[in-house]
Amino acid sequence: MSKREEILEAAIDLFSREGYAAVSVRDITRAVGIKESSLYNHFPSKQKLLESILEMFRREFQSVFPPVEGLQALLANTEPAQLLRNGYERFRAHMNSPGVSRLWRIVSIEQYRSPLAREIILKDMIDYTLRFLEVAFAHYVAAGQIRPLDPMVLASEYQYPVFAMLTEYSLLKAAGEETASLEQRMEDHIEFFLGAVRS
């Protein structure tokens, strides 16, 4: 790893365990084995270091979604059940990546303090996901595959329980606790939702 990557890795580890406010620049440089002045060669401030980490999470999160330019072709060749199950599996795999799970914790810890973390949760994690599902459900309504209901209402009804369960999943995984019953509830949610909206 480059020295910049070592600094990022140490900061991610410390911020995910202790929170940004509890970690000093000295803590980070001690973990890397460099002088404090060396950190500033790569990041102008501890705040900029946090912002780099949050942007890293944003890119990772966005990579879970199919490219926008191929969305219509994907929807034309994917049944609603397959789209929802694939989406859930992609998110679960995303959250199970050790590096990503630490980034999730940082975003969760910092959402009330950092404007960027708050923006990522509200715009990327909630709004973008709802808009993606709105487009998908509008397609399926037009194709007659699901009942003619408001696509944004469908997106909200589906996604808010998913978001809550993924948050619970993240907390359980971080504590090393069992997730099988939660995963079954997620499967049950998908089945229930599909049963309620199919034409």
Image (cartoon, rainbow, N blue to C red):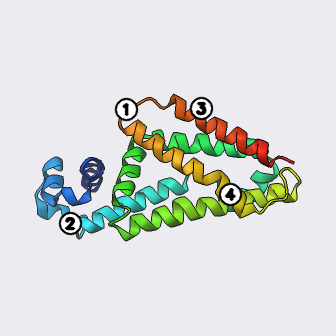
Using the image, tell me which numbered label, if any, was put on residue 176: 1
* Proximity of marks 1 and 3: CB atoms separated by less than 8 Å: no
Q: Residue at x 34, y 60 (%)?
A: 110
N-terminal-most mark, 3 or 4: 4
Q: Secondary structure at mark 2?
A: loop
Residue wearing tag 4: 155
Disc 2 versus disc 3: nearer the observer: 3
Question: Which one is in front in this view, the residue at disc 4 or the one at disc 2?
Answer: 4
- The label shown at residue 41 is 2
**x and y percentages locating residue 75 in the rendered image:** 77, 52
Marks 2 and 1, how far apart at CA: 37 Å
Identify residue type, mark 4: Ala
Q: Which residue is mark 3?
A: 184
Q: Amino acid at mark 1?
A: Gly
Residue located at (59% from left, 36% from top): 185
Residue at 40 percent across and 31 percent down: it is: 177
